[in-house]
Amino acid sequence: MATNIGMMDSAYFVGRTEILAWVNSTLHLNVSKVEEAASGAIQCQLMDAVHPGMVPMHKVNFDAKSEYEMIQNYKVLQDVFNKLKITKHIEVNKLVKGRPLDNLEFMQWMKRYCDTVNGGQMHSYNALERREACKGGKDANKKTAPTQASSRSSSTTTTTTSRTHPSNTSRKNDSTSGNPTNPPVKSAKPVANGGPAYDEQITQLKIYVDSLEKERDFYFAKLRDVEILCQSPELEGLPVVAAIQRILYVTDDSPAVLAEAQAMIAQRATQEEHLSPVSKIDEDKPKVETQKRKNIQTLEVDVAATSTLSPRQRLSDVSDVHHNGSPLTTC
């Protein structure tokens, strides 16, 4: 179950249009912007759709306008997450601000989660009936129903008009073509501001740029951590660190940078193999010199001791030699 998904998962590449179409078809709403989900009520009903009876819908407020009312909806959603043992962190402080990118990411996660539960099958869910128990749910249903009815009636009226008045249209065309003095009909000029289609494209581009900036900052922070680690005194002299710094500080897109870094590591390893016997000899030299110094100091101490002995001590030493069976006594 997709409780924790990575930032580069395919779920975060689902477009805003697809998210809105999924929400409207599932909950029978008429949401036109992702920011409308900032209140948290839509997320609560989506969880109610995939886990029937788990969400206390009477606590959900579809008419939440202030941040305090929105936070109450997210508390209901967090309680549901805790009951289901979902470890997804809800960034309430960001979501209630109504920023498009934050709400889009959370709705992308919601879609991925709902798709993993029972394959996203919610055909028997009655969204209108469940929403009537919520505060402001009836008003939301009223806003949705006239929109759908008006769209159906307009399509029916257009079809009926085209069927019942074909002769009038043909007569007008004939009279217009037969009277050359009538001025031609002026074509409608395009709207200066571009209309809602351009606004939608601009919003999508802004969301795309925001996602790219977030991804750039994420990977830049990782590279900065690696750079700080390579600059530590304990690791700065290692050949691997030098190779990593070579890759980090390259200014062009040359494909030979990796080969150069590997050559640096191999060259340093070869130098260490050639220098290792010399280092052993250098380590043995101080030991030999130290032993020689100890022997010389011992001889000097013995000479100094014999030179400071009195004649009586020397005679006692000679007598000791005679008593010990020295070869000198046999002469």
Image (cartoon, rainbow, N blue to C red):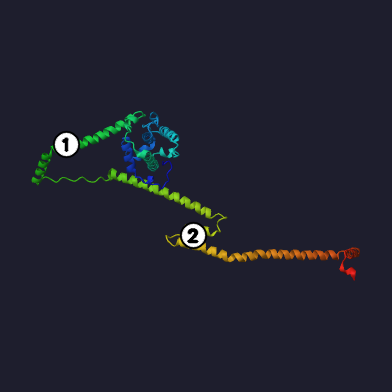
Residue type at numbered disc 1: Thr
| Residue drawn where x is 77% and y is 64% of the image | 297
Which one is nearer the viewer's eye here, 90 or 240?
240
Q: Position of residue 294 (x, y in %)?
A: 75, 63
Query: Mark 1 vs mark 2: which is more N-terminal?
Result: 1
Mark number, residue 246: 2
| Residue drawn where x is 57% and y is 64% of the image | 273
Asked if marks 1 and 2 touch (Cβ < 8 Å), the reply is no
Q: Is residue 239 left or right of residue 52?
A: right
| Residue drawn where x is 79% and y is 65% of the image | 299
Q: Is residue 105 left or right of residue 238?
A: left
Label 1, on which residue? Answer: 160
Q: Is residue 83 left or right of residue 171?
A: right
| Other residues around mark 1 within 10 Å, as few (<14) / some (14–19) / many (≥20) | few
Question: Which image quadrant is residue 188 in?
Answer: top left
| Residue drawn where x is 41% and y is 39% of the image | 95
